[in-house]
Every structure is written in structure tokens, then in C-alpha cells.
Amino acid sequence: MKNCLEIKDLCKSYGDFALDHVNLTIPGGTIMGLIGENGAGKTTTIKCILNLIRRDSGTITILGKDNVADERAAKLEVGVVLDECFFHDSLRPKDLKRILGPVYPTWDDNLYADYLKKFKLPEEKLIKEFSRGMKMKLSLAAALAHQPKLLILDEATAGLDPVVRDEILDEFLSFICDEDHAILISSHITSDLEKAADYITYIHEGKIVLSEAKDDILDRYGRVGCSAADLRAIDPSDLLRVRKGSFGCEALVPDRGAFHKKYPKLMVEKIHLEDIMLFVGKGEET
């Protein structure tokens, strides 16, 4: 299994914000979910990968190619879907193959037609008449038609209804069914990532605070609710973050099993990715 994307010690400073030594690896055949608050650095990281903004330091390798030194060759193997459809409203789906075909040597008209049919997108209809879900599926069809090996999506499923999101997630799973393809998806919809992602990377204030296999995170991490007195009796090294309220306290636990053995009287609940985001975003360090 080779890595489709490797980011090592990526730094990018804007003065009031900086990506601080971001490290990220996506093996072939996997989906990496990138989560974090607004302004945490998700889109900046993606723009650095695509060389839309120049990194200050570090390296980014796409399928073995440096994204700056071998930019053109690297980008030919990348499909990108952003949170908005950037195809002009006056175009029709059938027009896109004449525009994008000459750009990508690997563009496949038949594959594009198959995706339009699969997604039930009429070739003759103007894009301005498409719903948001239809526009997103059109962007995905165009991104996949040149047969990329790495798919990058930045909030691509935001604002879509659950049926459309589920349809797109199924397509993602089909895309990575071998070990030659991978997906990086930035999303606030953590429930989608819990369904589809193999790995989760959490970026907070420009730093990676968590990057692990999704199943390991959901199996190990937990939440304990307790009184202030109970909290004082817990070794701070057994907790990651704490939230204190008027009616008690709750804490993020990195290992539910170990915590339960050490503190059998305290109940530890399973946790979701959204809960972890709330703890990191609003909780206090121990």
C-alpha cells in the first residue's frame, strides 16, 4: 500500500494565523476526514496541497510527486470538489466535456456520461436550473471523469440533504475500493465521516491535535460526567480536556477501558467526533 498524500512539517504564516508543522499521511485505499472549527486551517491546508498558496516550509508529496516541483504532473492525478460549484450557470453538463477534455489527457467521455446517468443529471439542462445537490454531483462527476487517484473535497457535502449525502458517500466508498485511490475530505458533518472515513485528523488553531484511525478514536475515547469533588480526585494525566458547568463537570478521556479500571465508580460514556470537537474547542486543558 503506497501513500497517496504525504504532508511533512507544513508551515504557512499569515501573521495572525499560522499552520504550525502540520503532518498528514493518507495511504492508498483509505478516506481521511479532516475536521476542525472554522478558521482552524482546513482550507489553508488544502490550498497548500493544491499549491494555490505557497507554503513557507515543509514538503507535500502527491503520489510520489512534489506538489511544487512536479506541480502539473501531480495535479493531473488529483480531483477536486469544493463547497461551491464553479461551473458557469449558462453552461450545460454536456458542455463541460468539451471544456475539460482537452485539459486532462486521461479524461474519459464515456465515464463522464456514465456518471451523469448514474447521478440522474440531464445533459441539456442549464446549470443555473440545478439544485445545490445536483450541482455538487455534477462537480463530482467532472472530478472523477479524468480518473484521478486522489480526490480532495472541501466541505463538499455541506448543505445537502441526507439522501444526497448518502448517495455521494457511497460513491466515495466505491472510489477507494482498491489501494491506488484515496480521499481527503474536509467536513463539519462529523456523522458522515463516522460512516465513511478510515482516519480522522483534527486541526485546531493551525496545529494537528489528533490524527488516528477513526475506529480507534471511537473505541477508545470517552466522556466522564462527575462532580467537582470527583474531578479533583482524578489524576490530570488520565484526562485530555475538562468542561465545568453549574451542574457538574465533564471530561474527555483518552482510554475508556483504562479509566474504568482505575475509577470504577465513575461512568464513562462512548463519544462521537462532534463531542471531541466541543471538548477541544471549548474545554480546558488538564
Image (cartoon, grey):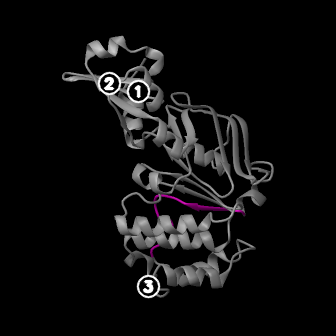
Task: Give amino acid for label 3.
Answer: Lys
Q: Identify residue for label 3.
A: 125
The Cα atoms of the two marked residues, 2 and 3, are separated by 60 Å
Q: Which residue corresponds to mark 1?
A: 260
Q: Label 3's element?
A: loop
Quarter in which the N terminus is drawn: bottom right
Q: CA distance from mark 2 to mark 1?
A: 7 Å
* Residue 189 in sight: no
Residue ranking furthest to the bottom: 124
Residue at 45 percent of width and 35 percent of height: 221
CA separation in Å, label 1 and label 3: 59 Å
Residue 175 visible, this orientation: yes
Residue at the image position 49 percent from the left and 31 percent from the top: 205
Name which of mark 2 and mark 1 comes first in the sequence.
1
Mark whose residue sits in front, 2 or 3: 2
Q: Is residue 258 magenta?
A: no
Image height of 284 relative to 58, above or below: above
Q: Which residue is mark 2?
A: 266
Magenta span: 77-89
Closest to the observer, 95 or 123: 123
